[in-house]
Structures are given as structure tokens and as C-alpha cells.
Image (cartoon, rainbow, N blue to C red):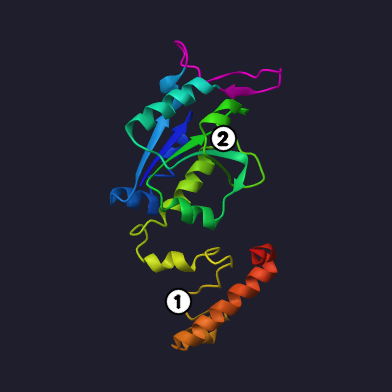
Amino acid sequence: MRIDILTVVPELLESPLSHSIVGRAVAKGLVEIHIHNLREFGIGSRKNVDDYSYGGDAGMVMMVEPVFRMIEKLKAERDYDEVIYMSPDGEILDQGISNQLSMLENIIILCGHYKGIDHRIREHLITREISVGNYVVSGGEIPAALLADSIIRLIPGALTDETSALSDSFQDNLLSPPVYTRPVEFNGWRVPDVLLCGDPKKIREWQDAQAMERTKLLRPELLNK
């Protein structure tokens, strides 16, 4: 899989995408991550990528030309399954979306910045818009890193134990059951006896019941899915 990320602040992406599971997946050759500075196609001697908004609203807007030229350059080199814009008004990211995207070959992720991007980019270049929640952050870089992480960990071989992803929260629209490790007892707090019984059927039944109970209590809206 190849992920190309377009940004005006590449430094914000370098560390999150160089370590832990994502970093190991890159080292194994399971995924390529290419971070592109949009200023490579900036306008004029100062390589500007933003300008004032028509209509007089406050804040600067990312211009269409640098984004267009970079996307066209990448598309000339390979085909892309999706060109994604990290947008506060896009579809809310969930596990199902991450599952879908993890099966693609090549994707582009565009990080907005400033007040936003020229709407013509969204109309003519973007194939999908994704939001990480109903709030606004300073730019699309952190959401893009979050999206990339959620995708890459699902690629076969990225996790040491591939079955681990199958029991993650939201994979079946339920929260995960509680998890425990050694010691069995600490400060008077004990691991539930069922997890120590050695009977896989009883353990699974307990985990399923706990997942359902926690979802009803903490995220009941998931049950509607």
C-alpha cells in the first residue's frame, strides 16, 4: 500500500508516522508513506500556497493551483483509489471506513490548513472527505496521521498478532471487554476468576457479555448500527 500525504507543515507528520506499529510496517515494506510539501508548487518567489478569501471573510485560504499541480504530478506516476480531504464536515471516521481503506492500493490524503481550501479543490479533485470528529483543529495533519495509523495497523503483517485487530473496539460495533495482565491480585484488586479458568468457551461468553454491557452503558448509539 502507498499513502501520499499533501501538507504545508510536513514536520507535523514526520514523528507520528515514523514509530511504533506504523514505523515497523514501513520498515517491513508493508506500506510506503510519502509526505509532500505543497510549497514545492507554491506560487511566486515566496512559494505562496494561500491567499485572502473572496468575500472578505477572515483567514487565509489554500489556493487551488498548488494542490492541483501536485495531485496531477502524482496521478501521472500511478493510479489512486481515493483522494481524501481531511475535513470537519466530512463523513465521521469509524472502524468500517478504516477497514475499507486498508484494502486499497494507493491513496492521497490532503491536509487542509489556515481557514480551509478553495472549494474548487473539493468539487473537482477530491473523491472522499473524512472527519475525525465534530470539532476544529489547527490543520489536517494530525487527523491525517490518525487516519493513516488506523488504516496501516490493519494491513496483514503490521501487527505482531494479526488476530489482535479482530478484537479491537468497534470491529463489530461493540466496545472491547476489559483486559487484564499479571499480577492476578494487586492492592486487593483481583482479575475476574473466569479469565483464569482455562475454559475458552466460558471466557468468550464472559467477554461477549462484557462488550455488550459496556457498549450499552458507554456508547449505546453503536448498537443502532
**Residue tagged 1:** 182
From what the image shows, is residue 56 above or below residue 154?
above
Which three-letter amino acid code belongs to the residue tagged 1?
Arg
Is 129 a magenta residue? no
| Whole-percent x, y for residue 206 in the image | 55, 82
The residue nearer to you, when weighing 190 against 74, is 74
Which three-letter amino acid code belongs to the residue tagged 2?
Gly
Q: Which mark is residue 151?
A: none
User: Which residue lies at the image location 58% right of the left edge and 26% below the top edge?
Assistant: 120
Of pointers 2 and 1, the one earlier in the residue sequence = 2
Residue extent of the magenta highlight: 43-62
Q: Is residue 170 left or right of residue 7?
A: right
Is 54 a magenta residue? yes
| Whole-percent x, y for residue 179 in the image | 51, 73
The residue nearer to you, when weighing 64 against 145, is 64
**Residue tagged 2:** 139
Q: Quadrant of the C terminus?
A: bottom right
Q: Is residue 82 visible?
A: yes
User: Which residue lies at the image location 62% right of the left edge and 74% below the top edge?
Assistant: 212
Which callout, 2 or 1, points to the residue nearer the camera? 2
Q: Is residue 157 left or right of residue 146?
A: left
User: Which residue lies at the image location 69% right of the left edge and 70% below the top edge?
Assistant: 217
Q: Is residue 190 visible?
A: no
| Whole-percent x, y for residue 160 in the image | 34, 63
Q: Quadrant of residue 72?
A: top left
From what the image shows, is residue 39 above or below residue 188?
above
